[in-house]
Each structure stands twice: as structure tokens, then as C-alpha cells.
Image (cartoon, rainbow, N blue to C red):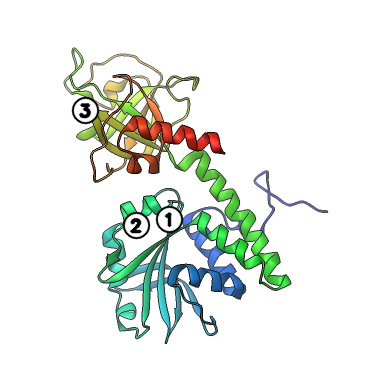
Amino acid sequence: MTELYLHRRKVDSVFQLLGEHENDISYSVAWALARCPSFLREFLRHVLDWGGAPNGTEIRLQQPETTGGITDIEIEVSDSFYLIGEAKRGWNVPSQEQLKKYATRASFVASTAPLKRLVVLSECSREYAELRLKSHVEGIPVVPVSWKDMVVLAEKALAEGSHAEKRLIRELLGYLGAITRMQNVHSNWVYVLSLASGTPPGWGISWIDIVRNKGRYFHPVGTGRGGWPKEPPNYVAFRYYGKLQSIHHIDNYEVVTNMHERIPEIPDGEWGPFFLYTLGPGFGPDKQVRTGKIYPNGRVWCMLDTLFTSETISEARDATRARLART
């Protein structure tokens, strides 16, 4: 059998030719929904608890509207339901403002469909997504659906689909399976660090203010053997004053040997090499998460959702270890 490679990577599914960015994933899922009625029925049952025949369904991609932005996916049967889907890569969810823009789109508001939903497609577990999203926006229910959920729905559709549907669904399962495996390796990990409360001798800025005021953080390029990481993590979190303070996505990083060139309040001199991170906006649980049983300057790895469902950071660390032990 002839094998196909793209950039030295073996291609096992036609969907891999698109890629793995947000739009690529939403295009792939939309194509499968449009070509596989069994998959579409399972999806509608999951999102709407709707068991009708999906005849006459319209699926639209990248629909612009002057004041309503550009939607990723729209799924509509005019006299039955109207869904707007927003797809996200990684453990990210859309902002309240973005969902409000969709909920107030002129076409969405004007629709007489009795069932309307805003569907958030992402790698987030339902428990985590529900903590980050409001249940309703402008009166419209918000339904989180993970890519793992889509895998389960596609697997259910295999049992009832035609031969042609089954072939396409199997290709989609291979594609989504690769994405969810990447999630486990990269997206859901947070490196939780302790920040000292004081200002180092000779510095004009404290560790806390480097994070809080400049949106930066740095540490030595490590070996990865229980010390500092040898590759930048996806997320970092900071604890001080006995509790979790903020979680940040690492938007960018560089390797720096003279920190004074980037942060003038630090004295001039050769260091390093050090990773210098540019941090995304801080976020975190609504509740207080205490440090728990961790050494004062201890650094731990946690899965992102465990920090939202645990009472302490040490509990989140232990929950992460228990989850890994089960896999």
C-alpha cells in the first residue's frame, strides 16, 4: 500500500492535510457532520437532547456579520434549532464578550427556531469549561463540548452509519485521536511556582511585580530531571502569601543571558541561559486555593482542571498523580 507523508509526517487521514489549528479542526468536524447523518444525529442528541431527523440541516462555516463577528460553525434547521459553535485549540474558552457578540447577531436574534444554543468546542473537560463559562449568555444556553466528547459521539455513530459514513468517521476518529493525545502531553499541564515576596538585593523590582506589573517571568533553562524544565510549559501558575494567585498561558518566550536588557530594574550582567516568558492575562478559580502540603519554595506540576476542582495546590498535585497512575 502506498504511503503519504506531509513534512516527513505520515498522513493516515485526509483530515490531517488540513492541519491542527482551530479552523482546521472545525472544518474537519463540520465536513463529517455534513456527510454522516448518523454522526450529526448523535451530536444533536448530545447538545440539544433532540431526536428528530436532521433532514434539511444547513451547516455553515466562517459566516461574517457586520456587528456579530465571524462564526466558526453554524448548524440550523430553520423551524427546529439554530446552533452557533466556537472552536478553540487547547484548554481555552471564548470570552464572555465574544459569546455575547454571537448571541446578539441579527440573524440569530431574528431566527424563529425554538431551540438556540451557543456551543463551545475545545479540549476542556466539561467540569473545567463550566467553571470558566456562564451557563447562559443573553438568555441563550451555553453548551461546552470537548474534542473527547466528539470522539465518543463519532464512535457511537459507527454502529448505525452506512459503509461510506463508517469510512469517513474512522478517518475523523484518527484525526481527533491525535489531537486529544497531544492535549494530554502538552495543553493541560501547569507548572506551579512559588514567588518570593521581597525584592532581591540590588534590584529595583520584586519577583511579584515582575509577574504582576510586567507580565513576565524567567527561570534557568533546566535539564528536566526534577529541576527546572528544559522546555517551556504551556501554562505557569504562581503562589505566594500561602495560596494560588494566578494562572497564565505562556504566550511567548526567549532565551536570555542578560536580563537587564529586558527588565531594566535588574542589574546589568551576564546570566543564564534563562527562559524569559511573556505571560498571557492571569486567571484562576473563583474560590481560594491554599498551598497545602508543599515545601515553601517547592515547584509542582498539575493538570489545569485540577487547580479548579481542588481545595489546595497539593491536592491538585496528588489528583494529577492519581490520574496519571490510572492511564
Disc 1 is placed on an element classified as loop
Quote the CA–CA distance across marks 3 and 1.
30 Å
**Of residues 148 and 319, the one drawn nearer to the viewer in this rendering:** 319
Residue 14 in view (yes/no): no
**Of residues 58 and 307, the one drawn nearer to the viewer in this rendering:** 307
Is mark 1 in CB contact (under 8 Å) with mark 2? yes
- State the mark number for residue 88: 1
Write down the quadrant of residue 236 in the picture: top left
Q: Which residue is mark 3?
A: 208
Q: Amino acid at mark 1?
A: Lys
Task: Tell me which label, 3 or 1, sits earlier in the chain.
Answer: 1
Query: Which residue is found at the position 45% from the left and 72% from the top?
Result: 49
**Of residues 198 and 314, the one drawn nearer to the viewer in this rendering:** 314
| Left or right for 185, reference 273 | right
Q: Which residue is mark 2?
A: 94
Quote the CA–CA distance across marks 1 and 2.
8 Å
Disc 3 is placed on an element classified as helix
